[in-house]
Amino acid sequence: LGLSEEAGWLRGERRRRRGRRKDEMPRDKMKTKGEVSDLKAKLAAVIKTGTLPQPKDGKGGSTGKGQSHAVPKDPQTVKRGLFKSILHYMTINVDMSGLFTQMIIASTPTNDIVLKKMLYLYICTYAQQKPDLTLLAVNTLTKDCGDSDPTVRGLALRSLCSLRVPNLIEYLLTPLKTALADRDAYVRRTAVLGVLKVFRLDANVVEELELEQKLKEMFANDSDSQVVANSLSVLQQIVKNPQDLITKPVVYSLLNRLKEFSEWSQ
């Protein structure tokens, strides 16, 4: 082929490829839309019956190859599978916010911490898009902040402070103040970082509730080294004069406890 003929062939090939991509894109979108609708139907079935409907293949549940469709009976297992699928679509930028109400209903009540983690991630992702519906989630998170399991309390508080919805800030203040005095160090660590999130939403609230003073007390007296490190990190970002935090008694106290701190905290 001559140069002009080769250039013409390349232009034609590019047009054909673009045409194929345009034809494929609608089909991909339709496929995704259908899968999302299927997930929504399955979630509704789980809410109503506690399990998925049996597949209708006309062969008594068999695939015809000696294999049967194994539909899990345990509600927790079913919900985990559905939640994982929903989070998968979230990671590839498919909008799953339309399932907000169903996700809340399907996950309560539950003691499954894996299910709770997935729910919390979903709520935090779409809270700003669905501020009205997020109020339903706030009730769930607030309740979990009083759970007997410290891991659940910490995760719920972290999610509650991560909603980034200014109108809902009043709902997280009581759980936050309670968590700052929690008997478990993990919950206190989470609460300290939660103060910074509240500060970024409304600095006046931190001042009104004297949370800065509370952090200073924890920085000086808390028995957990990570709580002390978190308190110092947060105080450096919210106080007007961070250099005033470092006094001779504080320096001596930190040096005496230096071995307790992690490499990052040091």
Image: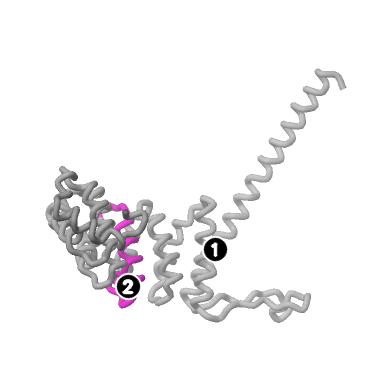
**Contact, mark 2 vs mark 1 (Cβ under 8 Å):** no
Report which residue position mark 2 lands on. Answer: 150
- Identify which residue is drawn at 85% across, 19% down: 2
- Which quarter of the figure is the C terminus placed in? bottom left
Q: Nearer the viewer, mark 2 or mark 1?
A: 2
- Which quarter of the figure is the N terminus placed in? top right
- Identify which residue is drawn at 31% across, 75% down: 147
Residue 85's disc is: 1
> Magenta region: which residues?
142-167
Q: What element carries label 2?
A: helix
**Where 162 sits versus 146, above or below?**
above
Q: Disc 2 marks which amino acid?
A: Pro
Q: Which of 7 and 173 is in front in this view?
A: 173
Q: Nearer the viewer, residue 157 or 242?
A: 242
Answer yes or no: is residue 201 visible: yes
Q: Disc 1 marks which amino acid?
A: Ser
Residue 230 position, x and y percent, is 28, 56
Label 2: few (<14), some (14–19) or many (≥20) C-alpha neighbours in 10 Å: some
**Where 260 sits versus 237, above or below?**
below
Residue 82 position, x and y percent, is 53, 67
Q: Is mark 1 on a helix, strand or loop?
A: helix
Answer yes or no: is residue 169 visible: no
Q: Which of 199 and 265 is in front in this view?
A: 265
